[in-house]
Amino acid sequence: MPDRFEVEVDGQSVVGVTHPAPGDRWLVFCHGFLSDKSGSYEERCRRAVDAGYNAIRFDFRGCGDSDGAFVDQTLSDKLADLQAVLDHVDPVRYALFGSSFGGKVAFHTAVADDRVTAVATRAPVTYNRAFDEYRDTVENKGVVTFEDGRAVDSTFFADFETYDFTAVTERLDVPVAIFHGRDDDSVDIEDSFDAASALPGDVLLEAFAGEGHRFTEEAEARLRERLFDWLDGSYD
């Protein structure tokens, strides 16, 4: 039975859901920039439980059920949110799955926590150049506003620029899986090719033909199957 929980970060509530399974394997999911823990993450968590993994999905502050305004949140804040969730469940070892910007959160967490046994991602933000267009808009207009009305400003980018993906490629020593749509017009698949080449350990990179930044239901089902096949051989 899924269990809803709340943890406090800087006086604000981060809301998550635990999907328990027998055993001590854990898989923690990090959603994308303008996303939340619902939808595909529920399906992924159910599939994780079927595969024997205790699964966690949660909302970063400014998203979903968690407190906070989106415009106030930085990458450092998202890393703190994930850390609070991990402190709550306190796994001995765990794998991370990050989608889009959640992939960047997962990568930078993995180099700081030796409990991480594997990192899987879908269309991950790796190199900061993926946000160049947004940065340019902030420099010219002071803010970039997305279709749903949420926005980021210079505060976000001042923090964002302190996280260089080179720090990940120099230090990450666990298996990595990257799943990316060939027709992604939000995060260039070339960034994933470059990341796979630069990462020092074992890397699985799968390009999904005809898929954009958001996967179709068929591609999402394929991703889940490939993810857990890979984890079976990668979770140490």
Image: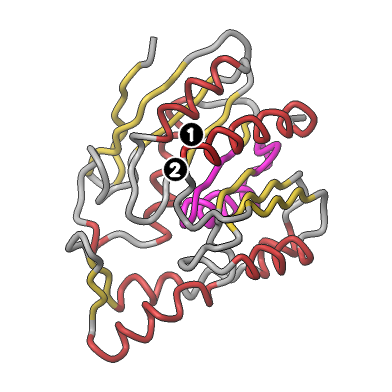
Classify residue 126 by image quadrant. Answer: bottom right
Give the answer, above or below, for where 161 lies relative to 122. Answer: below
User: Residue at image x 53%, y 57%?
Assistant: 104
Secondary structure beneath label 2? helix
Whether pointer 2 and pointer 1 mark residues with C-beta atoms closer than 8 Å, the reply is yes
Residue indicated by mark 2: 82
Q: Position of residue 99 (x, y in %)?
A: 50, 49
For residue 48, side relative to residue 85 (left or right): right
Q: Position of residue 138 (x, y in %)?
A: 30, 83
In front: 73, or 180? 180
User: Residue at image x 31%, y 24%?
Assistant: 5
Say what amino acid the circle numbered 2 marks: Leu
- The stretch drawn in magenta includes residue 139: no
In front: 41, or 113? 41
Classify residue 13 by image quadrant. Answer: top left
For residue 155, side relative to residue 75 (left or right): left
Q: Find residue 86 and name its label.
A: 1
Real-space CA distance between mark 2 and mark 1, rounded to the nearest whole angstrom: 6 Å
Query: What is the residue that sits farthest to the front in this orientation?
Result: 210
Q: Quadrant of the N terminus?
A: top left
Please state the extent of the stretch shown in magenta in the rendering: 96-119
